Amino acid sequence: MSGMMKRWLLNGRPIGRPIQDDDFKLDEAPIPSPGPGQVLLKTLWLGFDPAQKGWMENVADYVAPMEIGEVMRGSGIGQVVESNHPKYKVGDLLCGLTGWQEYLVTDGVGYERPVADLKPTAMLSVVGTTGITAYGGLFKLGEPVAGDVVVVSGAAGATGSVAGQLAKIAGCTVIGIAGGKDKCDWLTQELGFDHAIDYKSEPVRPRLKELAPRGVNVFFDNVGGSILNDTLAQIATGARIVICGGISRYQVGRMPAGPENYFNLVFRRATMRGFIVLDWMSEFPDIRRRLAGFVNAGKLQFREDEQHGFENAPRTLLRLFDGSNKGKQILKVADPA
Ligand SMILES: NC(=O)c1ccc[n+]([C@@H]2O[C@H](COP(=O)([O-])OP(=O)(O)OC[C@H]3O[C@@H](n4cnc5c(N)ncnc54)[C@H](OP(=O)(O)O)[C@@H]3O)[C@@H](O)[C@H]2O)c1
């Protein structure tokens, strides 16, 4: 296929500040040609993760550094439009790190096909690394036991909403912390959370004391900052604090100060552990099957927030940081053939 394609390049490092428009540069390049054993993928959807800001800042050492001028890294789903690969034919969908570009060439390593009985974009959300993060963080680190009180922050987000529902499946009492009435109502009225705290209009610490008088057994934290500190004040003996993410730090950029209430880990003999989902790569197929099973059994709901237009990629990423996204943030770039 000949012609030109668009791509978004990294143009700045948002360290110590929010992401700005000129941190990205829209560029044109020739559509690449697949060599032997390769396919040409046309990007159909992009998936967005708060971690992308960390990649732009180059603060994380669990992924290769991102250089200025590089195509912005990100996950996506592409459709094969030319194939020189024996395993893939024209029309096949593949999910992986497509980056923010309209076309790309790959040998398929690191790419996976969508789950057959779910919509393709579920690979970016509930059965993708998002859902696997929720599953692994909750069950491997949180180790919930039926009857436990589980608190989830960022609870109406892509990861938090799955973590909270999985805790309900495990027989726990689940309290979600999210921003705004709509999100809180969605948690309690549609997802089956027992309680929701709107951190934008209610103080978290006294509400947790009221809702979990005997303490919090598992805290699945996506947010960090004052929400982590407030929850640490209310943990039960033997609590497991799972540090999934700390999105509250991203607006300021610098690494947060340690939580004042951390000494409660000593008084309550509690643990606080972080993780990177990629460490469980070998278990992805198995966890994905379990998540798909819960979805198909009607026990696990997921919501995707689909924006449109390749030009809107930077704007779509920003939605994660002001809480505009309702569920997994994705961007539709092109229609499947
Ligand atoms: N450890 C891992 O391997 C791993 C893997 C994937 C994701 N994660 C982490 O999981 C977390 C959730 O990611 P996601 O992709 O599912 O995103 P998401 O939760 O769908 O979207 C981000 C949400 O964060 C909330 N938020 C933004 N700024 C905030 C602030 N200053 N204080 C409190 N809440 C804020 C917003 O919800 P409200 O409207 O409720 O404020 C927003 O909707 C992130 O921290 C991410 O880095 C970790």
Image (cartoon, grey):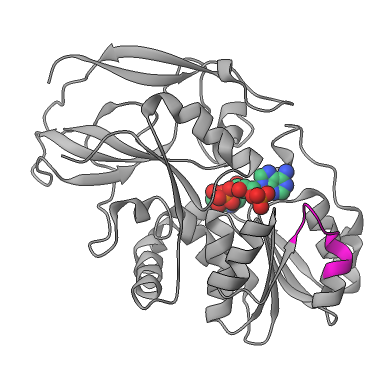
The residue positioned 42% from the left and 21% from the top of the image is 8
305 shown above or below 55: below
Indicate the position of residue 220 as horizontal and vertical percent values: 66, 63
The residue positioned 46% from the left and 57% from the top of the image is 303
73 shown above or below 4: below
119 shown above or below 291: above
Which quadrant holds the N terminus? top left
Left or right of residue 6: residue 67? right
Q: Which of 277 and 309 is in front in this view?
A: 309
Indicate the position of residue 49 as horizontal and vertical percent values: 52, 42
98 shown above or below 215: above
Which quadrant holds the C terminus? top left
Is any atom of residue 233 visible in this view? no
**Quarter of the rendering containing residue 213:** bottom right
Is any atom of residue 334 visible in this view? yes
Left or right of residue 304: residue 164? right
Number of numbered markers: 0
Q: Which of 45 and 309 is in front in this view?
A: 309
Reply yes or no: does residue 288 show up in magenta. no
The residue positioned 57% from the left and 15% from the top of the image is 22
| Residue at the extreme bottom | 147
Indicate the position of residue 167 as horizontal and vertical percent values: 58, 75
Q: Nearer the viewer, residue 110 or 203?
A: 203
The residue positioned 53% from the left and 15% from the top of the image is 11
Indicate the position of residue 237 as horizontal and vertical percent values: 83, 79
**Quarter of the rendering containing residue 319:** top right
**Quarter of the rendering containing residue 58:** top right
* Residue span colored magenta: 198-207
